[in-house]
């Protein structure tokens, strides 16, 4: 395995701007559209309006020849599944319950991948951060990647548990509000853990991580 002495990361401002825009475009805006239309027109039109936003965002990027963010594609697929299930049952409760179940499934997937020593965070480190396989394969980096899987599992458990409690209490507006506020906050905290723990692991392996706020 070739020695790696330094890893140059994209500017933090660029990464944060990109992540923030993807979260707003793929999750917050469709949730707000659904919430608004639910009170104005009812469940069916609210479902189609939220779904239409996701596919319009994908079409806009496709026509421009831009790269499709994984967050937007996954959001569109989840929104399509949730819409089909909600239309079949004609229930707002079922529509809001589906992503709650998904949160627990994701938590199990993250925790399971850590136990199997095939952490999902390794793939994210390569796709979103650009860390080479020679770096993610290092022993101390692998240990941190497994621990970060547990961090993301906890984030999803908290998200799912809060939403489930609000659903049981029939507070549908509060569910949407909690997801619009709590999810980005928890995600930001998990990303911060990724940066800090990942940087410490790289230093332990003798690799310097070049972080900067912006390009000079």
Image: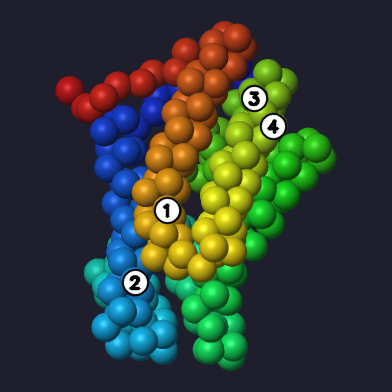
Question: Mark 4 near mark 3, Cβ–Cβ under 8 Å?
Answer: yes
Left/right of residue 186 with respect to residue 160 in the rendered view = left
Alpha-carbon span between mark 4 and mark 2? 36 Å
Residue position for label 3 = 144
Residue position for label 4 = 146
Residue position for label 1 = 178
Q: Nearer the viewer, mark 4 or mark 2?
A: 2
- Residue that extends furthest to the front in the rendered view of this protein: 169
In the picture shown, does residue 200 fall above or below 129?
above
Alpha-carbon span between mark 2 and mark 1? 12 Å
SS of the residue under disc 4: helix
First in residue order: circle 1 vs circle 4 = 4
First in residue order: circle 1 vs circle 3 = 3
In the rendered image, the quadrant that contains the N terminus is: top right
Asked whether 166 or 189 is in front, the reply is 166
SS of the residue under disc 3: helix
């Amino acid at each position: 395995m070739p020695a790696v002495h330094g890893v140059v990361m994209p500017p933090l401002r660029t990464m944060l701007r990109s992540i923030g825009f993807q979260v707003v475009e793929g999750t917050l805006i469709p949730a707000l559209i659904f919430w608004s239309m639910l009170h104005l027109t009812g469940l069916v039109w609210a479902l189609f309006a939220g779904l239409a936003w996701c596919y319009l965002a994908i079409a806009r990027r496709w026509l421009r020849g831009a790269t499709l963010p994984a967050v937007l594609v996954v959001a569109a697929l989840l929104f399509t599944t949730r819409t089909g299930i909600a239309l079949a049952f004609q229930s707002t409760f079922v529509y809001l319950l589906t992503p709650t179940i998904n949160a627990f499934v994701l938590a199990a997937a993250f925790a399971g991948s850590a136990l199997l020593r095939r952490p999902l965070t390794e793939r994210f480190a390569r796709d979103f951060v650009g860390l080479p396989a020679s770096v993610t394969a290092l022993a101390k980096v692998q240990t941190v990647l497994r621990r970060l899987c547990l961090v993301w599992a906890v984030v999803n458990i908290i998200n799912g548990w809060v939403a489930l409690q609000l659903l049981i209490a029939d507070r549908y507006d509060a569910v949407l509000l909690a997801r619009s506020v709590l999810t980005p906050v928890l995600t930001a905290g998990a990303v911060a853990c990724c940066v800090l723990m990942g940087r410490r692991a790289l230093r332990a392996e003798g690799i310097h991580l070049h972080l900067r706020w912006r390009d000079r």
